Image: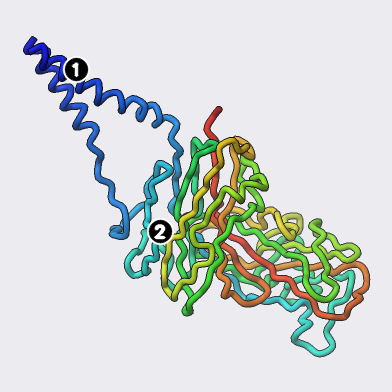
Amino acid sequence: MKKLTVILVVISLLILVGCIPSYEPNGLDLPDNYEVPETNGTDIPIAATPTPASNVVLPGEPPSNITWMSPGKVLIGNFYPGARAEYPVTIHNGNDWEASFNVTYRYPDHVGEGYTKPSIETQDWVIIADPTPILVSGETRNILVVLAMPEGATSPSSKWEFWVSVVDTTQEGSVTTELCCRWIVDMRPS
Amino acid sequence: MRKLLVAIVLALALIIVPVVPALAATEQEVTVTGVPAFIAISNAPATWDINDVDGATGKTIAPDTLYYSNPEGDTTIPTVGGAVDGECRFTITNTSTVPIDLTVLFPDHTGGDASTNSETGENGATTFGAKSYFSGQIEAAWVVAKDTGSAAGLEDLAATTNIKWGLIYESQSDAWTSGDAMTSTVTITATAA
């Protein structure tokens, strides 16, 4: 009986230890060699708040006088009606001047092999926290993008894609540039 | 002792019961992965006045005519066996850290005759045709520049590699009626390949 009691106590302790959450860094104190981690659909790896470029330099980041966006792709797996996925699009203003940007849902011009273009209603599932940010020269900012598919909604297909567009609206001239982040969605097998 | 055992078993049951559904849910969790990469391009120059219409006296844009953003002449076709750098007006400076695709959109005009994009690369009555070409591409690879939904004009441009490119514009087949200027803003889009 004593042995059984000891065994049960040990099992209890093992279970309790296993339940303690491990520490994961989050927020603005990112090391220079910070790598964007995978998330579980609700965690935001980088805070969705303005961050001066001098505070955060990501590995491989282009020179500070270049306007860029990151990441290039967001891969979403096991998505389903009623689910929510979010990820920040990071924008850097490489201009010498304060620049306004348009961050918008973008119907893709083309999609990856095996994927389809989204349906019309998909644009209603995408929420952009700040679609018209104004960044001072050299500023880097994270703009949270949320894909929230309503329950009961019909997926465009089992594999589909949409883009998030970033345009510097201070560009002048008749030939302008646009940077797009590809959101590639794999639905959960039914 | 029995009481202690019962208490421990109950405690275990209380701990395990809430854990079970969490373990079950893990299999169905949505995964979100950002692929670390920077997408960055700039383009210069940022203008093309077709047939130098805005910079020279007596220049006009004729109907039913092919124009090229070719520094060797706006009616001079680039080398069909492979356009060369000198035949490309624009330069993309690419500081992206991954291979990228480049896609060109040429929207409908506003003002004047408001000529619209035929989306076929060929002109027609009240519609213009448009294509893009990149240095090194043969004529068969020049891609139709649509109002929306163009195919990629250039795929898999290597990271931090610049490229020169140009536009082809075929003016509408019928005569102008308004005599007023019309404008369109071309967009070149970079996406991760």
In the displayed structure, B159 sits above or below A152; it is below
Establish if A144 lies above or below B183: above
The picture places residue B121, in percent across and down from the top left corner, at 80, 59
Displayed quadrant of residue B15 = top left
Q: Nearer the viewer, residue B186 or A13?
A: A13
Q: Is residue B137 above or below residue B78?
A: above
Location of mark 2 (residue): A48
**Which image quarter is the N terminus of chain B in?**
top left
Left or right of residue B26: residue B127:
right
**At 89% across and 72% down in the image, what residue appears?**
B63
Given this view, does label 1 or label 2 mark the residue nearer the observer? 1
Can residue A114 be seen in the rendering of this structure? no
- Helix, strand or loop at disc 1? helix
The amino acid at mark 1 is Val
Q: Position of residue B79 (x, y in %)?
A: 75, 65
Label 2 marks a residue whose chain is A
Q: Secondary structure at mark 2?
A: loop
Q: Which residue is located at x 84 percent, y 69 percent?
A: B171
Looking at the picture, how far across and down is residue B143, in whole percent? 73, 57
Q: Which residue is mark 1?
A: B9
Q: Which residue does the image show at 55% across and 37% down from the upper left?
A: A151
Q: CA distance from mark 1 to mark 2?
A: 45 Å
**Residue farthest to the top?**
A1
Percent position of residue A164, x then y: 56, 55
Structural crowding at the residue carrying mark 2, measured as other residues with C-alpha within 10 Å and reported as few (<14), some (14–19) or many (≥20): many
Rendered image quadrant of residue B118: bottom right
Residue situated in front as seen by the camera: A47 or B58: A47
